[in-house]
Amino acid sequence: MTTDTVTPVRTALISCFDKTGVPELATALAARDVRIVSTGSTAAAIRDAGVEVVEVADLTGFPECLGGRVKTLHPRVHAGILADRSDADHVAQLAELGVDPIDLVVVNLYPFERTVASGAVDADVVEMIDVGGPTMLRAAAKNHGSVGVVVDPVDHARVLADLAAHGGLTTALRQDLAATAFRHTATYDAAIATWFAQRDDADGAADAGAAAPAVPPAFLGLALERGATLRYGENPHQAAALYRLPGARRGVAGARQLGGKELSFNNLLDTHAAWSLVAEFDEPAVVIIKHTNPSGVALAPTLLEAYRGALAGDPVSAFGGIVALNRPVDGATARAITEIFTEVVVAPGYDAEAREVLAAKTNLRVLEHSDAARPGPEWQVRSIDGGLLVQTTDAAAEPWHEWRTVSARPLDAALEADLRLAWLVAKHASSNAIVAARDRSIVGVGAGQMSRVDSVRLAVERAGGRQQGAVAASDAFFPFRDAVDALAAAGIVAIVQPGGSVRDDEVIAAADEHGIAMVLTGRRHFRH
């Protein structure tokens, strides 16, 4: 058990790239007779606030050099931070060397990740690799028995509260601040190592005379912050939590909950699936998801029409589903959504009437997703026993111009529009997937089956006769003509599929035999 102690703060070293709250913190510390040591622009900001500052160069007797690369890397700084105040030998050595202890280190680091994201050239990115900052943070965090360390401005208030209440920093606070500092430096180092690995892969591809491939790097640093502890996982006997990438604001993990019950593990999975699909469309669209699979999808001039079309796709499965919309929700659409039990609604925004209508359903989880843009290619990670599988997300824009009509029957504009809709939905349904669409709405989905013929059967059953004159999409090629025969018997008039089977000729001949239009995309969309 750690003994609870309170350590005094007589000297604080403050050196921050992000100076949020720094002048206020320095002013409050100075009011408690704390000596402030600082560097460069941080010292200037503190001095501008009317607080006396000791420059690090005056403390060390060594000037800042190499364009600012060397400021705090000096024994008078690090001995002052690392000396264990409970160790008599350490205290004696400080006195012998004439080094003053440093009791509080307030440091944040150069914005490496922000610089990378800005598209800066390599030389500018390298200059944002902080050396002195992480060294001070690690030193202070290691010596948290004697020193407080602050990396996040949100913790300024906690430090001042401890000083006011106890006259120093408590063990509990110092330990918590040390853990935060180590998490921060680990995240920082992981970002740097990942950037180098990705850059090396790109350089290797360029040397080979090819475009840089989107291949997983030799090192992939995953630094995650727990955003929420969930009630349980997929089942009540499983523990679960939501982890976010540091600073992440995009994606479902960054969505803002406006109302309703706590989100569950399954809610989050389904909402991710719903948003990923609805973000595919540029015109007003509504997606209804059940167990990560689309049960209804529709495009229309208004959200209300699109919602009614999506609901008609499978009104039974929509009960207890997730509704995603790619436009701000109006009152009429909100009222329509609340007519049946819905778990989650996610949209880019809601007007005042919609908010009032949805708030009346206290169990309905309402999410506002600020990033309405289609997700870019990022790394997708899934766990297996003993490791992780990593791939880029299946988010690249569809090369519509590469579609080839291979049947005797040509396509008209209406058929092609429905085929495009069915194709995008099939991309988001579990394999094997067959999706039937008509008049810009999904009328039947068969997904997650071991046999493609079984997926056809399920899609036709869901359609309940509406597949007559509809089109169908298959997420992968047809290995045999049997699924095409089944679709034709059900009244399907056009099919889109990747092609690539050794029996493509046989499959195309079956389409011609039935008078069905067939398009090959050359791209597969498995989803396991």
Image (cartoon, helix red, strand yellow):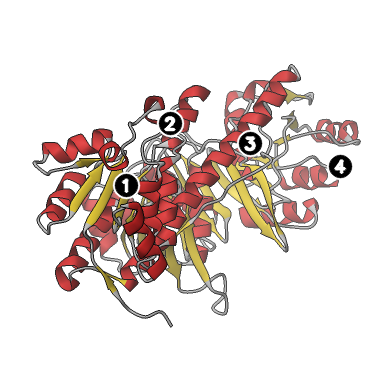
Residue 48 shows in this picture: yes
Dot 3: what SS? helix
Task: For marks 4 and 1, give the CA distance.
Answer: 44 Å
Mark 2 or mark 1: whose residue is earlier in sequence? 2
Check contact, mark 3 vs mark 4: CB within 8 A.
no
Image-quadrant location for residue 171: bottom left
Residues 517 and 149: in front is 149
Nearer to us: label 4 or label 1:
1
Residue visible at 30% across and 66% down? 361
Task: For marks 3 and 2, give the CA distance.
Answer: 17 Å
**For residue 232, side relative to residue 166 (left or right):** right
| Residue behind mark 3 | 197
Q: Disc count in the image?
A: 4
Residue visible at 73% across and 38% down? 524
| Three-letter amino acid code at the position of disc 1 | Val
Q: Position of residue 251 (x, y in %)?
A: 45, 47
Task: For marks 2 and 1, give the CA distance.
Answer: 36 Å
| Three-letter amino acid code at the position of disc 4 | Arg
| Residue behind mark 4 | 481
Are there few (<14), some (14-19), or many (20+) residues within 10 Å of tag 2? some
| Residue behind mark 1 | 329
Mark 3 or mark 2: whose residue is earlier in sequence? 2
